[in-house]
Amino acid sequence: KATNGFDVNTGKIKVVVPAGALKDQNTPTANSSDELTVQTNLIDFKAPVWEVTKTTPVTTTTTDIVLVGTDEFLDKAASSLDKNTIQVLLDGNDAKSVIVPTLSEKDTSETNKVKYTLTLGGLDKVSGEVKVIIPAGTLKDEADPANESAVETIELGRVDITKPVWNPVTDLVNANGTVSFKISGYDKYLDEAAVTNELVSEKVILDLEGEEENSTTIKSTISNVAFSNGTVTADVTLTDFGTYSGSVTVKLAAGTLKDTSNPVNSCDGFTYTID
């Protein structure tokens, strides 16, 4: 009689036909069959799987992914990982030249399991959606034919530990008692709402020959704030110098630029000196 459910059950099946199940017509005493035992080979339709432990969101320059391959009849010798066949993608593109993977030695100390630690480095140099793909067939069991693991896709989500940055000042004009220049900053995930709240005239600090003051002598204005593809630009204008003569340093506090990552990254302070 056929046995159903092989797709969810694994193991060896023993079928026992009891003695006497068959009898002949001999008289006065019929001859009976002996007990019959039939032992199957391993029946196993379940594929080995990778169990993945990861930390998200990623907040450090390196991150570890623990990979444990498991199966009731795992063939440890035939199951292995090779870092050269593991894909690391950034926004869907190959990123192994920047995000450097290293792989621990195979740990076979646990029953029916193999364990690796995959470490990704260089995460301070990237900003985007990171995905790791383990190819099919890296795990095998002892069935005949062997069952093999499927492709394992590991989503790390957005990896972004880079700060927004200020670009060099451009378009400096110093004439007729007025100084103006353009500032710009960038982040792939720039938080426009947060930057709009911070990039206002009241937040400008002026350092006059080493003495900080909030525009009490010279008037500072930020205007024409605009955003485009992660870049913010704005015009800074200084007026009402009066009789002042000397250098002026324009400062914006750290955190004026923020992104939308989790946790939030903030820029260092902005400083620009006009002699």
Image (cartoon, rainbow, N blue to C red):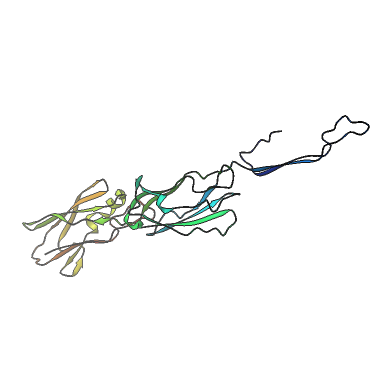
Q: Residue furthest front?
A: 26
The quadrant in which the N terminus is found is: top right
Q: Quadrant of residue 42?
A: top right
Residue 214 in percent (x, y) is at 21, 63
User: Is residue 25 shown left or right of residue 159?
Assistant: right
Q: Residue furthest top?
A: 25
User: Is residue 159 shown left or right of residue 10?
Assistant: left
Q: Quadrant of residue 256?
A: bottom left
Q: Residue furthest left?
A: 176
Can you say whether 214 is above or below 126 in the image? below
Residue that appears at 32% across and 56% down: 125
Judging depth in this view, the residue of 262 and 30 nearest the camera is 30
Residue that appears at 39% across and 59% down: 62
Can you say whether 200 is above or below 14 in the image? below
The quadrant in which the C terminus is found is: bottom left
Residue 105 in percent (x, y) is at 47, 59
Q: In this rendering, does residue 159 appear at all? A: yes
User: Is residue 150 shown left or right of residue 229?
Assistant: right
Residue that appears at 63% across and 38% down: 6
Judging depth in this view, the residue of 252 and 264 nearest the camera is 264
Residue 159 in percent (x, y) is at 37, 52
Q: In this rendering, does residue 91 appear at all? A: no
Q: Residue furthest bottom?
A: 210
User: Is residue 8 shown left or right of residue 215?
Assistant: right
Q: Quadrant of residue 40?
A: top right
Judging depth in this view, the residue of 205 and 97 nearest the camera is 97
